[in-house]
């Protein structure tokens, strides 16, 4: 099966980060996931963190885990992984549309340009995004997305065409904010462009175009869920959280009037009435690095739901049992999600707090007999280094994962997130292992790190496709079902 996700803008990138972690826990249906980012601000800190998470996933996927939910999904990252309508240039809107030339050659068009855009909108450099002005972004993206010659769009188009022609279920999911600049501009514009490529029957020269077949387009639109206090000169063009609700209202009306239900099979709307304050305001670039938020987990679950569902059957709503509180029962498919995400959290906790430190100590000081499971797997005689390769890949991913889990519990204003005992991750207190997944259960002999150690000493993975260090991590992961 072919699944495609496009993260648009900083918010879209953060949601792809959450989706990557769900892939690690085995939540995706069988098939390949193709990822692509859209952002004129290639140095965006939110984008960078998602790129790092994806690369960590791809690294870990190289290990031979065997047949398991752990890192089950094959993720293909687009090349280039981030598309910007400007490439390496830093144009203003006037530069982009050759405003000076238009004033001479087509003055009527230049006059219309003056009516549609303010002087600030026309002259601000756009390399840090569209700064809460989707009218700018929509015009630019509609002009620059090229499915024939431009990359990664040409490869994207060809992959979809191949999937559709082979009869595979083919689904494209877009994620972006409705209230900002890049996401609000790119979400409807790119969806319509994809729709136009695959839905039309013939090209302008009369040749048969790819049949839309089983292609479905879905998306998650994130309504306001954070706020910020701007810094810098008032005259500088930028987004304003005071305008978020007004922008959202206007955007939703636009989607309704333009009949976007004819383009999207399903649209998910997600937001939070309590806007969480961003710790440090940034217009863009690498200083725009906002903490992960639980709403992004919902957006990732929306993508999973779309990939698992054939068409739109009805209108669905999700609500929480208690105001200001998020529990497992408030998440969709929680009976499926909780054991998978819980097992991954347990494995990450155990690896970082116990097993990686022991591997590091044995690498430096020897005496591997202190860990019977180490003798069984004979790691370092197989040429495995503690400083690189699979050992480092797993460590890096686990650190990023527990940091993400901690942040989704702590970044939301006035919300009590009761999914994991996140304090355990900050201190890696060994006695907290059996109480990672909330609600806390009565501790017993089967949910301690000691019992996991014993499991690794006596239980072995019976899977010929599980090899080397990947086999050890698989065994550790399997043993964490006990929590």
Image (tube, rainbow, N blue to C red):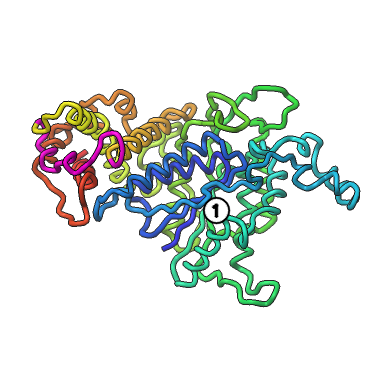
- For label 1, the SS is strand
Residue at (68, 45) in percent of width and height: 137
Residue 318 in the image: state x and y as whole percent: 46, 46
Residue at (13, 47) in percent of width and height: 460
- Residues 107 and 133: in front is 107
Residue 141 in the image: state x and y as whole percent: 67, 50
Residue 146 in the image: state x and y as whole percent: 64, 58
The local crowd at label 1, few if under 14, some if 14 to 19, many if 20 or more residues have their Cα within 10 Å, is: many
Residue 358 in the image: state x and y as whole percent: 19, 30
Image quadrant assignment for residue 457 = top left
Task: Examine the rendered structure and indicate whether residue 262 appears above or below residue 441.
Answer: below
Quarter holding the C terminus?
top left
- Horizontally, residue 204 falls left or right of residue 276, namely right
| Residue 164 shows in the view | yes
- Residues 439 and 481: in front is 481
Task: Examine the rendered structure and indicate whether residue 402 appears above or below residue 233.
Answer: below
Residue at (48, 39) in percent of width and height: 295
| Residue 434 shows in the view | no
Quarter holding the N terminus?
bottom left
As for residue 384 lying within the magenta part, the answer is yes
Identify the magenta region.
370-390
As for residue 90 lying within the magenta part, the answer is no
- Horizontally, residue 420 falls left or right of residue 444, namely right
Tell me the residue that label 1 is attached to: 267
């Amino acid at each position: 099966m072919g699944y495609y996700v496009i993260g648009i803008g900083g918010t879209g990138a953060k949601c792809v980060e959450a989706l990557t972690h769900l892939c690690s826990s085995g939540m995706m249906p069988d098939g390949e996931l193709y990822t692509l980012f859209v952002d004129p601000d290639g140095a965006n800190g939110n984008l960078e963190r998602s790129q790092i998470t994806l690369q960590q996933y791809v690294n870990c996927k190289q290990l031979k885990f065997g047949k398991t939910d752990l890192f089950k999904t094959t993720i293909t990252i687009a090349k280039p992984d981030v598309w910007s309508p400007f490439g390496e240039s830093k144009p203003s809107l006037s530069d982009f549309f050759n405003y000076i030339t238009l004033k001479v050659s087509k003055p009527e068009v230049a006059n219309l340009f003056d009516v549609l855009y303010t002087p600030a909108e026309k002259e601000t450099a756009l390399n840090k995004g569209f700064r809460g002005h989707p009218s700018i972004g929509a015009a630019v993206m509609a002009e620059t997305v090229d499915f024939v010659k431009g990359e990664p769009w040409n490869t994207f188009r060809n992959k979809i065409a191949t999937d559709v022609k082979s009869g595979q279920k083919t689904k494209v999911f877009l994620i972006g904010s409705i209230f900002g600049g890049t996401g609000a501009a790119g979400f409807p514009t790119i969806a319509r462009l994809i729709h136009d490529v695959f839905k039309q029957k013939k090209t302008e020269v009369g040749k048969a175009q790819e049949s839309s077949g089983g292609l479905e387009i879905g998306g998650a639109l994130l309504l306001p869920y954070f706020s910020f206090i701007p810094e810098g000169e008032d005259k500088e063009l930028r987004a304003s959280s005071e305008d978020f609700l007004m922008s959202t209202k206007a955007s939703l009306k636009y989607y309704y009037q333009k009949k976007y239900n004819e383009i999207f099979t399903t649209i998910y709307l997600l937001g939070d009435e309590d806007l969480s304050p961003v710790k440090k305001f940034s217009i863009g670039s690498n200083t725009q690095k906002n903490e992960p938020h639980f709403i992004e987990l919902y957006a990732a679950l929306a993508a999973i739901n779309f990939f698992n569902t054939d068409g739109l059957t009805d209108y669905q709503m999700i609500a929480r049992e208690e105001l200001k509180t998020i529990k497992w029962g408030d998440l969709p498919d929680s009976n499926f999600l909780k054991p998978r995400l819980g097992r991954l959290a347990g494995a990450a906790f155990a690896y970082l707090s116990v097993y990686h430190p022991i591997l590091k100590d044995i690498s430096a000081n020897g005496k591997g007999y202190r860990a019977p499971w180490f003798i069984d797997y004979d790691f370092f005689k197989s040429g495995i280094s503690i400083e690189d390769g699979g050992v480092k890949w797993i460590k890096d991913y686990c650190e990023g994962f527990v940091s993400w889990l901690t942040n989704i519990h702590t970044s939301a204003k006035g919300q009590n997130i009761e999914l994991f005992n996140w304090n355990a991750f900050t201190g890696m207190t060994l006695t907290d292992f059996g109480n990672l997944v909330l609600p806390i259960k009565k501790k017993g002999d089967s949910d301690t790190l000691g019992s996991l150690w014993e499991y690794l000493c006596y239980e072995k993975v019976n899977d010929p496709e599980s090899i080397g260090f990947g086999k050890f991590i698989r065994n550790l992961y399997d043993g964490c079902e006990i929590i």
